[in-house]
Image: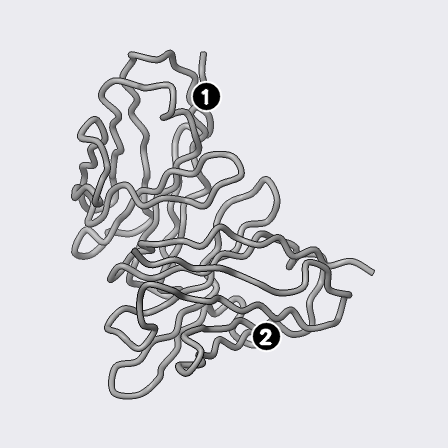
Amino acid sequence: EIVLTQLPGTLSLSPGERATLSCRASQSINNNYLAWYQQKPGQAPRLLIYDASSRATGIPDRFSGSGSGTEFTLTISTLEPEDFAAYYCQHYGSSPLRTFGQGTKLEIK
Amino acid sequence: QVQLQESGPGLVKPSGTLSLTCAVSGDSISGSEWWSWIRQPPGKGLEWIGEIGEVHSVGSNYNPSLKSRVTISMDKSKNQFSLEVISVTAADTAVYYCVKNFGAYLGFWGQGTLVIVSS
């Protein structure tokens, strides 16, 4: 089973700043089958990034994903007030078919 | 635009069976994409439970950690799919989401329903 570790657990930043979130895999992820989701309190998660770097429909271009192998990054170039939320990475492919990281909480400083 | 709506009892007794249904509108569950159940214990992270879909026949995949207690089924006549978890304990208390897959990923989510396991 591939284990995803997200760092940091909590990230405190101000609107207008740049956010960099990390997702590290315990083994290399084939085909860059790695996604990022955003979850606001009381809401369902929303798909932001898939295949490590492709933005889902309707996602603003301030969100970008990068990485390969075991190291992946979600970058929010300029934080908007609505971006403060929890973020999860997700892998596809090994057993279980889908696993999630434990999440990073992005909070207002 | 596809919409998913979970329904079912919000309270289940320990050792009982958790049963939820996901009604799908705006799309057919017999299409090319598969359909998943995800859960999230209060204040914790996400766990993929399993998925169901139809290629030439209906198939399913489960998280090995839950496989012995979980069944996912679909009712094409009602355009809905269901989750059943047997022998529940307090550890099964969670918000349960039904989701339309987007290939390897989880594209469209229902709003979620909280199920509490308690006597």
Q: In which quarter of the image is the C terminus of chain A?
A: top left
- The crowding category of the residue bearing disc 1, from other C-alpha atoms within 10 Å (few below 14, some 14 to 19, many at least 20), is some
**Numbered label attached to residue B69:** 2
Q: Which chain carries label 2?
A: B
Residue sitting nearer the eye, A29 or B54: B54
Q: What residue type is labelled 1?
A: Glu
Q: For the point 48% across and 75% down, which residue is it?
A: B72
Is disc 1 in the same subunit as disc 2?
no
The secondary structure type at the circle numbered 1 is: strand
Query: Seen in the image, is A65 located left or right of residue A99?
Result: left
Residue sitting nearer the eye, B78 or B84: B78
Q: What residue occupies the far bottom of the structure in this picture?
A: B57
Q: Percent x, y for residue B74?
A: 44, 79
The secondary structure type at the circle numbered 2 is: loop
Q: For the point 43% across and 17% down, which residue is it?
A: A12
Q: Percent x, y for residue B57?
A: 31, 88
Q: Mark 1 points at which residue?
A: A107
Query: Seen in the image, is B72 located left or right of residue A55?
Result: right
Q: Is residue B107 above or below residue B56?
A: above
Q: Which amino acid does label 2 sit on?
A: Arg
